[in-house]
Amino acid sequence: MLAARWSRDLTVVVALALLGLALALIPGSGWFEGVILALLLLVLPGYALAAALFQPGSIPPAERSVYAIALSVAIAGLGGVATQILFDLDRGVWLALLLTVTVAASWIAQWRRELLPFGSASPRLQLPSVNPLAIVAALVAVGVAAGAFSIAVSSTRDSRGDAHFAELWVLPQPGATANATEPAVSIGVGNHEGRSVSFLVRAARGAKVVARWNVHLARGEHWQTSLRTPPLSGAPPLSGTPPLRVTLLREGRPYREAFLRSEAEP
Amino acid sequence: MRGIGAGEPINARSVADRRAAQQERLRRRADIPEQGRSGARRRLRLGAAPLLALTAALGLLLVAAGNNAALDGPAGLRALFWIGLVLIYAPIALRLVSSSPGREERIALALTLAASLFLVKVLRSPTGFTRFDELGWWRATHDAVRSGGAFSQNPIVISTSGFPGLSTVTAGLSELSGLSIFQAGLILIGIARVTLTLALFLFLERTIGSARAAGIGVVVYACNPSFLYFDAQFGYESLALMLAIALLLATLRWSDRSERRQPETLAGTVGVLIVLAPMLVITHHMTTLAALAFCGLWTLAMLALNGGRRLDYSGQWLAGPGVPAVLIGVAALLWFALVAGGVTIEELGGVFSGAFHSVADLITGSSGSKQLFSGSGQGEPLVARTLALASIVPLLTVIALGVLKMWQDREDDPLRATLAGVAVLYPVTLGLRLTQASSEASQRASEFVFIGVAFLAATLIVEWDWTRRHLRRLAGSLAITAVATVTFLGGFIVGELQATRQPGPYMVGAEDRSITSEGVAAARFTSAQLAPGSRILADRTNATLLGSYGELDPVFGRYGGISVPRVLFSERFDRADRRVIHGQSLAYVVVDRRLTRELPLIGYYVESDEEGAFERRQPIAIASLRKFEAVPGVSKVYSNGPISIYDTSALLRRPP
């Protein structure tokens, strides 16, 4: 049987590549899918190509590891740049590219191994044994490093949380044309105060308030609305039309201001 | 059997005999087939590596605590960062310098050092990219994911369109795995860093013939000023360095006479060279040129030193590094001619011509030298200055002694001679630090030059006449480790602005220290609300954020002889400003009022050749930033306090 003669390492490589394909086709596989598909780009094609280029035992394992990673990166880079001439690079194209290279290189590696004298062509997939205490120490080290990362993330987030501000914007809505009688504008507020805050949003032209809104926003929340106003741009020129001025008030006091000027404004 | 390069006395034998014996032992030891000697399960001898991984992890904990204190804590605790660096580096360096560990332990230690120092960079900005280059590459990768192609124009880092290696691979990893671009980039660069270290270890091991020397070489290479942060960032050089060293490793195998006799290995090595050479070329210009120059020099050295004496290359120069040199050269020529010539000249031309002119001006007396340690506008503390200067002394000493020793030994190995030649460039790069414009060239050269320095240092240390007395050997190892640690810390001080070594409160024009929540919020707003690719004028920090996360196109340079940043600096909005906005189709101008607080740390607000760059005595006037409030036709569409965005598109429809 052909399958029985396949080298174990190449069988694992092809199996992982096909597993990646299967997981990509099944939605919702989560982090496991991510790990396998990351391997499909970063390790498997290079390992297979290195196996096709070098017979078992012909180069040291450490050097083979270097080539496996470097060749994987090169296959993704060169393959991606070449493929994009014909196709847009999306997930399906990446899968097809990397799967094809991995399986083809594995097949060539297996074919070359079969040409070797009997008994010399099948490296055993056997992890070296390690002192259990060394494994424990390494695991603790990983845990401590993860703790360091956690401290760094939380202190970065805390420092961001120390910035207390709110954002206000006013924009002509997309599609608002110059000759529309009442083009719409979009008004928005973002709360980065680090707590829930009540705002008053006031839109005015000159002394005339055209709209106002009471807005209560939770931490990190945004609010957006649209408002129809008299023409802001283009003909007919409304000489002297004051800008649409939007003010964000916090605790009754002006906090932020934005405005839209008419193009015709002198 | 003792470990390879275990520090045996050497004075009784000739250098050549010793090296031949070492290399033979190495081959016997290193070329163990994957299945093991007898098929029995092999035991991995990691020695003290797991314990030192633990100390390195504790070092990372201290680094994180020091960074935390720098953000919001007692000033005294900031020093934990430096203690953490020492805790990561020094114990591993001591163990690698000592003669007791075996080869597997040395490899494990070298990889632990590489991974730990990479994590120091991750701890600096653990939630997103913050450096200028990183954000430029984020934009390139984002465009590659969005458009399905990798050649989009990039307004922040122009060369990304000519060198799509990094953005293509990261985009593929992100799309396949579902990771964000930030996560995918970190994983890719982290793996590249570890692989680079392993490749460098193997390269030095085969060159010097000693695993101990290789470990010491890695320890010394980590002292290069770019190692800790610059070459760990999400940038094309970080990936290209790994490819280049892997390529050199394959070149070494190709050039090795004994290896070339094995047809199986020969064909495989050619295959590796054929794949890696073009990948290197499409990834980074400088590393490509450095690899090409190195292989070229190596070939010349081989021809010059051959003479039919000990190294018999039979006059076949193609049997050595000439073939890889030709492969890289042809690939580079084609790529630069067809794709990347313009961006390469635009980017490297500026760096090199600036360096050349500033050095020429310094020599002719047309301009003075840069005041050392003042490039950032911040004075370095005395301790930092001392460390920085002290780090240079051992390196210069090692180079002088190493070259002298090779001269005395009548070194005729072309590769070793080439590596020594590369090391000799280090003093030249130091000279380049004397001017502002050439400092960047010096910084960029360090990661290449240090390969030679690492070789010389490792060779000197392992070939030193080590005494057999334990205490003296320990004292020698401790002394070397102490010097190496000073060199490592000093290199970091030389290579990184004081302000950006650790996080901290906002500073004007201070690269990652200028990235704040307000800037990121403005970028998120523009990404969500404004047309992608709209042309904007902004200071360097906001241009970087809005050009990446904000998906807009910042504009720099000049228009009709007028500097574009002038629009921000002029106190009154005048006809020249209007001409620039019209001519450059600027749809938005971004104003950050914090710019008025202090002078920019890097010496300029928008770009290095703006008017007043490096010479200002006063920060930009508030009137300059307020002037947009009163310009007819200009709307203020966004405000978050310090940052406002003005819509100038109406001016484009009016005559300038």
Image (cartoon, helix red, strand yellow):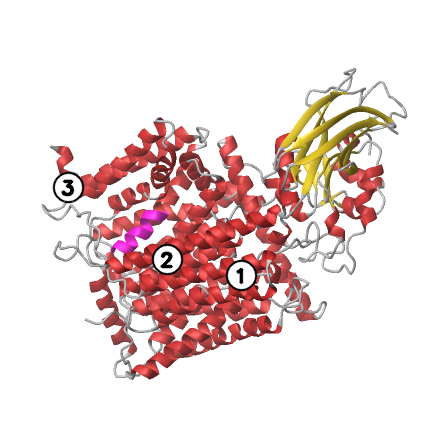
Label 3 marks a residue whose chain is A
Helix, strand or loop for the magenta stretch, by majority: helix
Q: Is residue A216 magenta?
A: no
User: Compared to B326, does B491 lie above or below?
Assistant: below
Residue B554 percent across, percent down from the top left: 66, 41
Q: Residue at x 14, y 42 (%)?
A: A115
Quarter of the image for residue B31 reads bottom left
The residue under label 3 is A114
Mark 3 vs mark 1, foreground winner is 1
Under tag 1, what secondary structure?
Answer: helix
Label 2: few (<14), some (14–19) or many (≥20) C-alpha neighbours in 10 Å: many
Q: Which residue is mark 2?
A: A141
Numbered disc 1: what chain?
Answer: B
Q: Residue furthest top?
A: A181
Magenta region, residue range: A60-70
**Disc with the residue nearer the chain's start (3 vs 2):** 3
